[in-house]
Amino acid sequence: MAPALAKKVASSTSTRVTRPAPTRPPPSRSRRAAETVNVRRRPSTLTRVASARTTLPTLTGARWSNWTRVATLVWFDVRCPSVARRAASSHMAMSRGVASTGTSPERKCCAVSSSPTVSSTWAERPEWGPCPAEGVLSEDEQGTTITIPPVTDTSLIDPGVLANVLSAALAHGGDMAEVFAEDSTSASAMLDDRRVEELSSGRSRGAGIRVVAGETTGFAHTSDLSEKGLLAAASAAASVARDGGGTARTVAMPLGPLAAHDRGDRTLPGSVSKSVKLDLLVRADEAARAAGGSISQVQVGCGDSRRRILIANSDGLLAEDDQVRTRFSVVCVANGDTGMQTGHESLARTEGYEIFERHNVEDIARTAAQRALAKLSARPAPSGEVPIVLAGGSGGILFHEACGHGLEADHILKDASVYAGKMGELVASPLVTLVDDGTVLGEWGNFAVDDEGRAPARNVLIENGVLTDYMWDWLRARKEGRASSGNGRRQSYKHLPMVRMTNTYLLAGRENADEIVAQTPTGVYVSKLGGGQVNTTTGDFVFGTTEAYLIEDGHLTVPLRDANLIGNGPEVLRRIDALADDFDMTPGTCGKDGQSVPVGCGQATLRITGVTLGGTA
């Protein structure tokens, strides 16, 4: 390891296990015996069920602290449906843990997490195991410890168990029952100012069960994937979805192997050592600093995830997917007479570490550094309505937010979208064809099946300026008597699915990007957009620019400081008068109703005749 890396090395996991280096010699044997276990426990006020598991240290004399938070299911007796419905409909926090699970107004069951168990311990050698018996409550007092098995390629839940759970979920009636199981692992590393600030990994495993009866949805989730744990969650969801009565249904699941989705040759994150990841960070750091003497700080991050999901429902659907994603980002700070300026560049793909065979981390770092250096000579952006030229790939997020969310069926059915009731109408320039496509291989919003088990599709939303369709999940499509468009997505097994975008983009045109700039006498060229937000009811949006240049006499001249683009989605679509052929995509993370999912955004270079720019000049 390079001397620079030895200054500060820390490691943490999503279970919040910190591993600081020892600051003193190991204690004497007598003192160690006295300090072996020190446990503080504050169980949930709603249930006495808790769980704890301690990972003992690998370095003699190192002091560890371990927090383990395991979701504890709270369910209500089916003989008291009114109590269940009233409690599960609440959106208030139930205790010091997770609030009642909710991403939509439908009634649902809740799950809470017990307060963390905190323990400190000394160890002589590497060891795995449960908390020492003398340091925890008895099994009668704390419940059963859940041991998470290692990651394998086998099915998350046996088809026979799925059939029993779905049958139990519909034992008191209902239209549809669904099991969504997930096993997700993630890891990240960060190099900040030539020091390793983060080297972490985590794992989440559990299942969410949904029961739909008419207009009512019951939902419960559990981290226990045993048949007993799943049956308890099914009972909880069923008690909310149905008052009792109805017709019981027996569900049979196919017993054959699930169809495999060919993802090609992948380098799985688990097969890549930490030293390889740190080498990528160091290479990028050195390249960024070599870009110019004004670079004063560099932060480099690398992350990966593997998400295995299984979806089964009472209609006979049984599907699974294995999603691997890798990301790499560089943030540079340049210091000059105008103060400190930042530049950012990232790479994110639904692939494994084979992406670094095609993409050079040094190039990513130099791009981020050049953006920071360019801003040192930036002048304030103009204010008022000006023509805007969006660089290829940079403006996809604008159409994702300003237009895409308004085309999601949940907003349409609630009449909370500016596009509601406009099917077949001209809503954009004839140059605009807007597509949402989860099948684009390798893009950030790509997957083999959505989180309801439906295959993604290429959905044309606006064609030649005419509104042709919306995006649908299973629940909203069912109400309209149509099929899902493969847009049912959720953040994790703890969440209900909802309508979400995948890879949303404008199809390319036929013009040359340089000619579009040359044909613009004055305006602003936006090379990169930051985050933004939109009011789906009105279509009004606000976006920040992170890299922009002034257009004078058809040429790019001086760089501009960060500013805001302010406008209206439908109006912007109508004002597009030029579209180039240099199509490109960018990754992003979309947040909606408390859930975040990976998405892709894209477009070719285009010109908008007028958008309000909130500059300071």
Image (tube, rainbow, N blue to C red):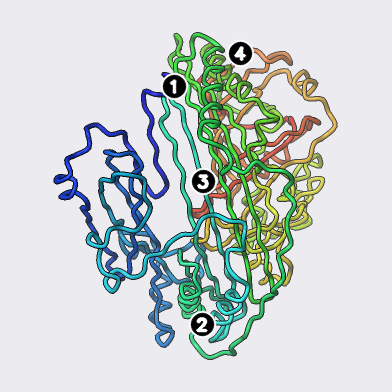
Vertical comparison of 451 with 18: above or below = below
Q: Earlier in the sequence, mark 1 or mark 3?
A: 3
In the foreground, 487 or 290: 290
User: Do labels 4 and 1 touch, CB within 8 Å?
Assistant: no
Number of the front mark, 2 or 3: 3
Label 3 secondary element = strand
Q: Quadrant of residue 100?
A: bottom left
| Distance Cα–Cα, label 2 vs label 4 | 64 Å
| Distance Cα–Cα, label 4 vs label 1 | 32 Å
Vertical comparison of 516 with 497: above or below = above
Residue to which mark 2 is pinned: 242
Vertical comparison of 308 with 162: above or below = above
Q: Pinpoint residue 269: horizontal percent, then vertical percent.
A: 58, 42
In the foreground, 16 or 407: 16
Q: Pinpoint residue 419: horizontal percent, then vertical percent.
A: 67, 54
| Distance Cα–Cα, label 2 vs label 1 | 58 Å
Residue at x-position 53% and y-position 18%: 372
Residue to which mark 1 is pinned: 194
Number of the front mark, 4 or 1: 1
Q: Earlier in the sequence, mark 2 or mark 4?
A: 2
Residue to which mark 4 is pinned: 558
| Distance Cα–Cα, label 3 vs label 4 | 41 Å
Vertical comparison of 276 with 240: above or below = above
Q: Is residue 265 left or right of residue 148?
A: right
Q: Residues within 10 Å of mark 2 (few under 14, many from 20)?
A: many
Residue to which mark 3 is pinned: 186
Q: Pinpoint residue 28: horizontal percent, then vertical percent.
A: 16, 40
Task: Give the amino acid type for the residue marked by disc 3 in the picture.
Answer: Ser
Task: Give the amino acid type for the residue marked by disc 1 in the picture.
Answer: Arg
Task: Give the amino acid type for the residue marked by disc 4 in the picture.
Answer: Val
